[in-house]
Amino acid sequence: LPIVAVIGRPNVGKSALVNRLSGEQDAIVFDEPGITRDRTYRPAFWQDREFQIVDTGGLVFDDDTEFLPYIREQAQAALSEAIAAIFVVDGKLGLTAGDEEIASWLRTQNVPTVLVVNKCESENQGLAQAAEFWNLGLGEPFPISAIHGNGTGEMLEELIKHIPPVDEIEQEEEIRVAIIGRPNVGKSSLLNALTGESRAIVSPVSGTTRDAIDMVVRRGETTYRLIDTAGVRRKKNVDYGAEFFGINRAFKAIKRADVVLFVIDILDGVTEQDLKLAGRIIEEGRAAVIVANKWDAVEKDSHTIYEYQKMLDDRLFFMDWAERIFVSAMTGKRVDNILDLVDRAAEGHRKRVSTSVINEVIEEAVKWHSPPTSRQGKQGRIYYGTQVTVKPPSIALFVNDPKRLDDGYRRYMEKQFRQQLGFKGTPLRLFWRGKR
Ligand code: GDP
């Protein structure tokens, strides 16, 4: 569901508003700049629109409190995945410098914002109280009382202009899949095998650019959008130099995808061009499934599969999180299983883990293997971590000094997160942040 982020200084009544909109008026109102609060997603609806509402910590810009970067990070993260924002200000207190700072930050964020003036208990005075907030340059201020509920109808009316109706959202919740690989590895054959016959309902839809064609495939409850199938099908009997490879087109498709089907020709092994594509998949933070095609053409004995596995381990060691499958697009062998791996990778890619669980993993990991100590005898320390975004899952780790946590330790920590929390099929990003 689309996400609406609630932003504002401490004590303006953000939690009260979230409670009001999600119909949970008994929940505790807790609105301080704090370090332990997770972003919580509460369901809310208005008319035919459904959305999730997420409260962010109280935002302050002009202070040097130790954990402010964390709170701002949370607000930024909430906003970056939000379809709209509600900016709450305090009508009793009037316009403050803090509000102005938040407003000017919000104006750079490109997220439609509804400005809400809270604590306007009396409807007559409300409009007068709200008037001065026109100065924030965020359009009409809506006077409300989160506690009593007045004004929330008008405010929601404005908010839902930015939220698509439920039936349109369904379509957005599809898994976007790009079939990527060098020429002749078997992408078109694979596309045919995946979309052929009665195994799926297939319909071509137009992609983002003029000649891009996407293909929509349904299986069970899940919809897959195969991105830029025109690019996959393109004739390639003319030598266009680099363009022959269609690399720009491939890069664009990677960018649009959730999961990349990274197709290699197992007869050729992993070539330099394959490595280039793999690098791009990681840079873009896409989930991936390694599809080793033309398995039918490999002469096999009982060891063959292990030899090929080992070759892939060696050549694609930096992508060891990706699941792989040996298929034949020509005979159809194991093609049916590809989408199972896609499902798993998509799940890992959008997976969200709570701050408390992340910190349990950190605590346990540090117990087993403590961070290195510098020559001056100063030890690296991790204060806490939190997942800041999905697609790919990204975890910010707040530490005393990032320099003390060397590559070896960073890899160890990533491995711990993967072992304890899964994240199958997806890159995982760790951000190491020092005290500011
Ligand atoms: P694309 O350029 O990646 O789209 O590759 P194509 O799908 O056009 O396939 C290139 C060539 O490889 C064609 O001659 C296909 O018949 C052949 N091919 C594709 N998949 C397989 C496979 O699984 N096994 C074998 N033996 N040949 C394949």
Image (cartoon, rainbow, N blue to C red):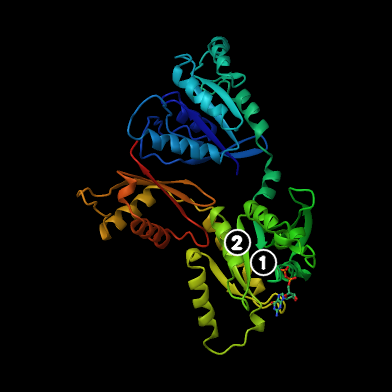
Q: CA distance from mark 1 to mark 2?
A: 9 Å
Picture quadrant of residue 398: top left
| Kind of residue at badge 1 | Arg
Identify the amino acid type marked 2: Leu
Residue 111's spot in the image, x, y percent? 59, 33
Quarter in which the C terminus is drawn: top left
Q: Which mark is residue 435?
A: none
Could you tell me which quadrant the N terminus lies in?
Answer: top right
- Vertical position of residue 301 compared to residue 256: above or below: below
Is residue 309 shown above or below 24? below
Q: Is residue 378 left or right of residue 105?
A: left
* Label 1 CB sits under 8 Å from any ligand 1 atom: yes
Question: Residue 407, percent across and down?
Answer: 36, 56
Q: Secondary structure at mark 2?
A: helix
Q: Which mark is residue 182?
A: 1
Residue at point 58%, 21% (across, down) = 151
Q: Within the image, what quadrant is residue 234 found in?
A: bottom right
Which residue is pictured at 50% across the width and 41% down the height?
Answer: 41
Q: Which residue occupies the foreground of this view, 97 or 421?
A: 97
N-term-proximal mark, 1 vs 2: 1
